[in-house]
Image (tube, rainbow, N blue to C red):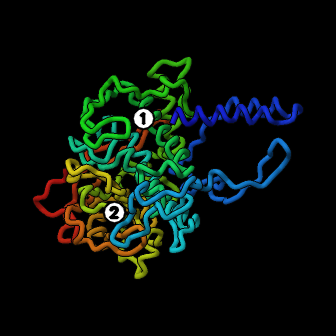
Amino acid sequence: MALFEESIWSNAQQIAMAYPRAKRAQYREAARTLRIPYWDWSISPTMPPEVSQPTIFINAPNGTTNVQNPLYNYTFHPQPSSTDFPTIGGSGHGPPVSSYHSTVRYPDSNGLSQPDLVNKQLQANGASLHTLTYQLITQQPNYGPFSNIGYTDARGGRYNSIENMHNSIHMFVGNGGHMSVIPYSSFDPIFWLHHTNVDRLFALWQAIYPEAQVTPQVNAAGTYTDDPGKSEDVNTPWSTKNFGYTYPEIEDWGVNSTQLTSNVKARLNALYNPTSSVSKRSSAADASDALTLSPNAMNVQWFANIRVNKSTTASPYFIHLFLDDAPVDPATWSFAPNLIGSQPVVDNSLLSLANSDLPMYGQIPLNHALLAAGTSDLSASNVVPLLTSRLNWRLQNVDDSPLPIEKIPSLKIHVVGQEVRPRAAEDEFPEYGQLVVYREVTRGKAGGLSDGEDTD
């Protein structure tokens, strides 16, 4: 990403020099400070308008002109062949991405992007993304489970990870398009706005947990730069300071490590949990509290934990959670009014056989849905019977067709809850209790965790 930004920056310097002398200094200064912008999808769960318009007006050196928007899509030169890109979906669930001349997002049957549906899907998961962002950074000080969906040691019931949220945005935006095929997703320009935000969230976490270390671990799957089996350890570069940049919330100059941590905690609270300075200590809130408090500010947190083997299918799909029955029309599932949230499972067609049976972990918050349904009492005595009778889930391919749950035998869903003491100061985090598993919620349901089955 740093190399990409360097290339963009270098080109901007040349473009700035092409402007008339009277305006050149202004554009040269703008070019000098140019950086890749980030899209904070946990605050703004719709695509930025700048990436959703096919054409845009720009102030070119020769005056205002209308041009093809380079952030809307990328046109391939030449057209990819079937050997360039894999078949996404498979078994009739979506055409191969090689069939598209340009990158597409949530393509329709004619191969045209559907930005309105992308945004509806993002908005339907906005509360979930908002909660997951705050809960991950404030609850997970260990790099292994923080970083990836496949970490299996001592997750402690915390199934979320930065990779999980990263994958979700890829699937919500792509949904059968190029962003859905992660190894090829960087052709879509929105990839860079998304990944800059992932880098930002990681930098926030580092500033809050400066003593955290990378536990030596073998990268089983490998990457384009590392062969499978290479070990990542404390010597792996992982700080923004190595590259000489930072983010608005991380003013890491003129302060010591303790001060920086305090400052970043305050900025994180202001963004994702601004209403946590409540004095209530009970698990119930009155109706006005339920309407005004952020889900992150409640005295109890509820989550649905999801575990499934990566190898179950090579095709990407969604696990949708609903409060009550799913709508009759599957095409509306991903933004249904009673949707709690969606857990994407990304394309696994490039997994090596040696890694095909690895589990992946995901998590969907439940508080926002409970509050929206008028349930202000979040105590276990009230929530457990409610979820037992009303929590449902459905699986769906990227072409919006239902995926029979019996085709995913490794799927295991269970519900956990924990008591929370809200933060007492602007630069403090809430105090979280142990996560308690409530097996009765999913007992007897297809894909639910049963008695005697291990949660990890």
Report the residue at 42% width, 60% height from top: 82
Q: Position of residue 122 (x, y in %)?
A: 50, 60
What label sits on residue 154 in the rendered view?
A: none
Residue 290 makes an appearance in the image: no
User: In the rendered image, which quarter is residue 339 located in?
Assistant: bottom left
Comparing 296 with 78, the one in front is 78
Q: Residue at point 22% right, 48% down? A: 355
**Element type where label 2 sits in the image:** loop
Q: Residue at x 52, y 32 (%)?
A: 2
Residue 186 can be seen, yes or no? yes
Outermost residue toward the bottom in this view: 328
Is residue 110 left or right of 367 when viewed as pictured? right
Q: Which amino acid type is shown beneath numbered disc 2? A: Ser
| Between 200 and 167, the one nearer to me in the picture | 167
- Please tell me whether residue 68 is drawn above or below residue 317 in the rendered image: above
Reading the image, the residue beneath label 1 is 205
Q: Residue at x 49, y 28 (%)?
A: 240
**Residue identifier under label 2:** 315
The amino acid at mark 1 is Trp
